[in-house]
Amino acid sequence: MKILVCISHVPDTTSKINFTENSSKFDKNNVQFVINPNDEFGLTRAIWFKEKAGAIVHVINVGLHETEATLRKTLAIGADKAFRINIEPMDGYSVAKCISDFINEKDYDLIIAGRESIDYNGGMVPGMISALNNINFIDKCVGLEIEGKKVRACRECDGGKENISTTLPLIIGSQKGLVEESDLKIPNMRGIMMARQKELIVVEPGQIDIKSKSVNFEKPKEKAEVKLISSDNLDELINLLHKEAKVI
Amino acid sequence: MSVLIFAETERGKFKKDALELASYGRSISDEIKSKLVAICINSNNPEELSKYGVDKIICVNNNDLENFNSKNFSDCISNVFLKEKSQFLILSSSSNSRYIGGILSIYTKAAYVSNVFSKPTKYKPLQLRRNSFTNKAYETVEVISDKVIISLCRNSYGIIENKVKSEVVSETFKIANNDILVSSTEKLSDKVSIADADIVVSGGRGLKGPENWHIIENLADVLGAATACSKPVSDSGWRPHSEHVGQTGKPVASNLYIAIGISGAIQHLAGINSSKIKVVINTDPDAPFFKSADYGIVGDAFEVVPELIEKLKKFKSLNN
Ligand SMILES: Cc1cc2nc3c(=O)[nH]c(=O)nc-3n(C[C@H](O)[C@H](O)[C@H](O)COP(=O)(O)OP(=O)(O)OC[C@H]3O[C@@H](n4cnc5c(N)ncnc54)[C@H](O)[C@@H]3O)c2cc1C
């Protein structure tokens, strides 16, 4: 089985978010970048298939040279080969199109992409790839078993879960639950050494269109001071929620 | 030309999101002077949408569409989009709608903008405002396409009545074979889900252990709320993962979010910040949550919450 995991290179969850160039661009200064958490759950499941079933695991990122440290980390965790499509990602569509074109010439059985990235929160790449390449798609995937071409998967939906049967080739939107948090792998020394020998191939993109572009960013306004209510005066809280906030 | 909304139903009834989409769609239709069309699948009462400004209600009734299937639903909606020569397709932010948003944008060759929380700020070219960086920033996006799919954040526009005379039409839809088969579903409980709830009551490590969760559940019961929890609570197995909210869990965009014994770590806040009103109950006056909340009580959850429940019961009996 050949697996491709799409890796987004995103600011760490604790990062302070700032913008530059007249608030039109994310300020990458002093920001620690990590593997997008939703992708990391997917990558861990892919490595599981490698260890248990001899799958081959490739990773791909659409991005400039700066993302290579993140790709190296995925190699250290256990991916076999990395690809970087050398273009600054402009919108969800162009990222999906780059990966879709890349997949076209290959024979991946399973493609894994995070349900959404924690930077732009588009949540569109896996669905677009599935439609562009006409392959089955399961979003918010929290369970995945594969036997031959047969797939049994579990998807989180609002208020519950769905058990789904389908076939390869398949793309999933991965998230927490696909593997447990405690299963996530921290690269060890041996992994890091081995990663240096593994191939990281830079691919030049073809002609890529975009369908949207960022104009500017704004940070939410500082919140007004909290209204403190004494714990002996809970009627006041109820009154405020009813009359002022109108939420009960 | 038209604006199309996908009005979701649950067991035949329109979800609240559907009424919000209709209200939002109406305002865009008025702005660009075009018809507002809704597609609804297996609705018992399609006429209800006329109350919220929908000019044309397209009903597809088909037993094979009783359960959500991403391929069939995408085929059905994109057919209508193309037939109605729509320029806009408006989706909710439910799990099902988010599932098909990307697929639909390829089928219809439209741009796709998710997490939108306001009306377009400009039409030529089209500009939309959305949440990004997990609620740490607002982004203005310009659409480079003559067609667009918008996924609207819950509770961001509101439901506005606007009665019109609507045309209701039935359409048949032929289901193509596909090999995504939902074999079974597991409903978590009969209670309202975090995604659909107007009020969410959430507990953190301050509650000390799973045996104390009845106070969270009782408070949720009085308010008709969904229950949620912080990440360490689900990681420790006190509560199911499905209740974990925050940056790496479920997002919350309710009207009211009540945080009990939750410190307010940045990753927690990122996921719940789009809730309208936040109440925090915490023993520690320096807990960071107080900086993000609208109302706060410095106090012990084990004393405050039971008393609050009793008072709310009284309030409810007087106000219902
Ligand atoms: C990559 C990453 C992703 C993360 N994602 C998430 C996420 O999605 N969601 C999330 O929640 N966290 C997330 N976290 C964890 C986050 O950083 C915090 O550790 C977590 O939110 C803390 O949970 P808590 O508030 O329940 O516990 P604590 O921080 O331990 O807070 C407990 C609070 O309870 C109060 N308390 C104690 N006793 C009482 C009492 N009797 N009555 C009232 N109050 C009391 C205390 O004063 C304290 O403020 C993430 C962390 C990382 C590194």
Image (cartoon, coloured by chain):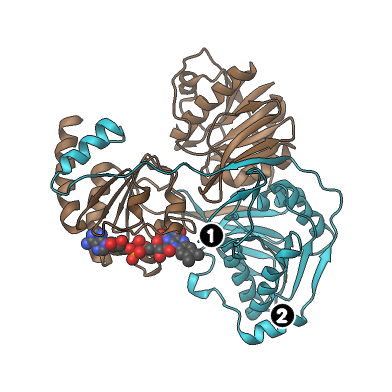
Q: At 77% from the left edge and 50% from the top edge, which residue is drawn?
A: A97
Q: Is residue B174 visible?
A: no
Give B139 or A180, whichever is nearer the viewer.
Answer: B139
Q: Secondary structure at mark 1?
A: loop
Q: What is the x, y in percent for residue A104? A: 82, 57
For disc 2, the chain is A
Select label 2 or label 1 by which is in front. 1
Q: Relative to A74, is A10 above or below? A: above
The answer to which quarter of the image holds residue B233 is bottom left
The residue identified by callout 1 is A15
Question: Measured from the top left, where is residue A22 in percent x and y?
Answer: 65, 43
**Can residue A176 be seen in the rendering of this structure?**
yes
Residue B89 quadrant: top right
User: Residues at marks 2 and 1, common chain?
Assistant: yes
The residue located at (69%, 48%) in the rendering is A92
Residue type indicated by callout 1: Ser
Q: Amino acid at mark 2?
A: Ala
Residue A183 at x, y = what percent? 52, 75
Count numbered badges in the picture: 2
Q: CA distance from mark 2 to mark 1?
A: 27 Å
Q: Position of residue B310 (x, y in %)?
A: 14, 45
Which chain is assigned cyan?
A
Report crowding for label 1: few under 14, some 14 to 19, many 20 or more residues within 10 A (C-alpha).
few
From the image, tell me which residue sits under label 2.
A195
Question: How dense is the environment of label 2, judged by Cα within 10 Å: few (below 14), some, or many (20 and up)?
Answer: many
Which callout, 2 or 1, points at the residue further toward the start of the chain? 1
